[in-house]
Image (cartoon, helix red, strand yellow):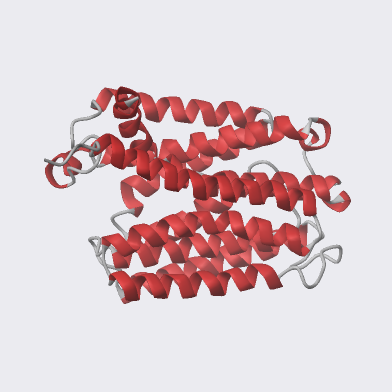
Amino acid sequence: MPRVLDRLAPVLRLTRVTTAFAAVANVWFVILWTRGYAYEMLAAPAPLQDKPLWALLGAGAANAVGLFAYGAALNDVMDLHRDRAMRLDRPIGEGQLAPEAVVLAVAGSLIVSVLGATVFGTTCVVLTLLVALAILVFNVLGKFVPAIGMVLLGLIYTGHMLAPNVELRFLVPVWLVMTHALVLGGLTHRLSRKSPRISRRAVVFAAAGWVGVTAGLIWLGVQRGGGVWPAWVEPTAWIWPMILVGVFAALAVRRVSQLGAGPRAAEKIWRYGALWIALYACAWLFGVGEMKATMVMGALAALGFIGMTVLRELYALAEHPVGYRR
């Protein structure tokens, strides 16, 4: 068992699979939402209408986890020299993984993501590749120019969420995830004291980008006949997601007050922020009375929380084995 943990721990840390549940939740939400609404089915791609649900959820999970792992591994490839010099806690910095293995992880993850996308059709494959390109731009430019990075992060989540059904008519859940990702990225960047710092000009640029993406989503909703809030969506469906927004804000304030501003607080808020995306999906589905779909998303959120807890304990066990005191 210890040998297995020793081999798996660097790979799991490299791909950050414990926070990949957010990407899976986004894709699964769109699949479950589309399957649950007759109005949505009119504009849904044929695979979402014809294929069994288990096949769609499996392919969606492969697409989401693959693309998330691609982004995480690509980040380590781009930061190779800096990690070796400054971040010895990362797998490459510690020498646990060879650069060649990381390159294979990048390529393999992208292949898995594209294979998952093929189940949803050509449009999903193209959008997956465009999101992969956006992730590449984020790692090359966005991380070092916070104004661009925050907007790109929101666009990446938006594009990937829409991949299974680019004709989705109800876009408010997509807007909420985009906003959550943009704010979360900026908040954790500031808390972790990353360089360069977020200037006032960067905040203004990011706010303008958020307004632009919001306007684009509103335009898409109107063009597709759904408007901002389609008539077939219950008018009270927004209540539960907004309650979760308030709870997350309170949780973030509490963590910062307990731990102080720093990388530790930023890491915790980022992990909980990833889990919160799955909770948003549960809240939307619960708000419109889709109880079976809510249970599916609830199970995913629970699995994400348990997975984060268990894998972190396994990391600790692999890196600091339990011994006897003398």
Residue 270 spot, x, y in % from top left: 41, 58
Residue 293 spot, x, y in % from top left: 75, 49
Whether residue 88 sits left or right of residue 56 in the image: it is: left
In this rendered view, identify the residue nearer to me: 265 or 235. 265
**Could one spot residue 214 in this view of the protein?**
yes
Residue 66 spot, x, y in % from top left: 50, 34
Extreme-front residue of the structure: 326
- Number of marks drawn: 0
Q: Residue at x 39, y 46 (%)?
A: 137
In this rendered view, identify the residue nearer to me: 63 or 213. 63
Q: From the image, which quarter does the C terminus lie in?
A: top left
Whether residue 299 sits left or right of residue 268 in the image: it is: right
Whether residue 40 sits left or right of residue 113 in the image: it is: right
Q: Residue at x 65, y 32 (%)?
A: 58
**Could one spot residue 73 in this view of the protein?**
no
> Is 253 placed above or below 294 here?
below
Q: Residue at x 44, y 47 (%)?
A: 308
Whether residue 225 sits left or right of residue 3 in the image: it is: right
> Is 176 placed above or below 132 here?
below
Q: Residue at x 64, y 28 (%)?
A: 118
Q: From the image, which quarter does the N terminus lie in?
A: top left
In this rendered view, identify the residue nearer to me: 150 or 258. 258
Residue 213 spot, x, y in % from top left: 56, 63
